[in-house]
Amino acid sequence: DTEVTQTPKHLVMGMTNKKSLKCEQHMGHRAMYWYKQKAKKPPELMFVYSYEKLSINESVPSRFSPECPNSSLLNLHLHALQPEDSALYLCASSQGFDGELFFGEGSRLTVL
Amino acid sequence: GENVEQHPSTLSVQEGDSAVIKCTYSDSASNYFPWYKQELGKRPQLIIDIRSNVGEKKDQRIAVTLNKTAKHFSLHITETQPEDSAVYFCAASPMDSSYKLIFGSGTRLLVRP
């Protein structure tokens, strides 16, 4: 299985809602990532987990809260988001720190 | 920190022609340079990568060259086909930031049939 699976594919939420994005991989990869991608822009790194520990937080606002329950799962909890947070949220995984990133299809988030 | 610049932002070629996309990086300690292809509405996927101990790497119609002295690397696609139409992102991995890829701004490639 060489897939990274993300749910949901689409999410619409109000600024007062609480929701979560989920990501799963079964490739035995030890690093998992959250990226944010705006239209016509490159992916922008948000968080990196290495061996289930948060190793990089790119100064992301606290309304985004990552969680890594185990080596296969990665969540992104969303609370009190702003309309400018609307974007495609991509999860990725990799075996090592400088190898191929395997991306999921993304969760397209719209904040009203 | 590392900065990656990518040119051109858009590229239109006739089917069968070659396409070249160029990137420059700022951190001389960067040692890993992947290229990702992202089709419309799809996930980015690695198409080729090169490490700093190699000057050139080829995979069928795709090749990447790296000039460490000048701090630039290029993607070459020969005999382009309509299915090559996509956005291509270069990236560099700084030595001081494990797990962190710095992406270029992307090149939208259109292959005209």
Image: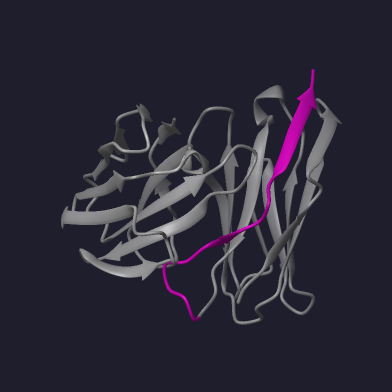
Q: Position of residue B90 (x, y in %)?
A: 64, 54
Q: Is residue A81 above or below residue B58?
A: above
Which residue is painted at 52% across and 42% down in the image? Answer: A84
Q: Which residues are magenta?
A: B96-113
Which residue is painted at 43% across and 61% down in the image? Answer: A99
Asked if the magenta segment contains residue B63, the reply would be no
Question: Could you tell whether B36 is left or right of A18 in the image?
Answer: right
Q: Position of residue A97 (x, y in %)?
A: 39, 68
Residue B87, image quadrant? top right
Question: Could you tell whether B12 is left or right of A59 in the image?
Answer: right
Which residue is painted at 79% across and 17% down in the image? Answer: B113
Q: Nearer the viewer, residue B57 or B47?
A: B47
Asked if the magenta segment contains residue B109, the reply would be yes
Q: Position of residue B58 (x, y in %)?
A: 65, 52
Quadrant position of the N terminus of chain A in the picture: top left
Quadrant position of the C terminus of chain A in the picture: top left
Which residue is painted at 30% across and 45% down in the image? Answer: A79
Q: Is residue A77 above or below residue A56?
A: above
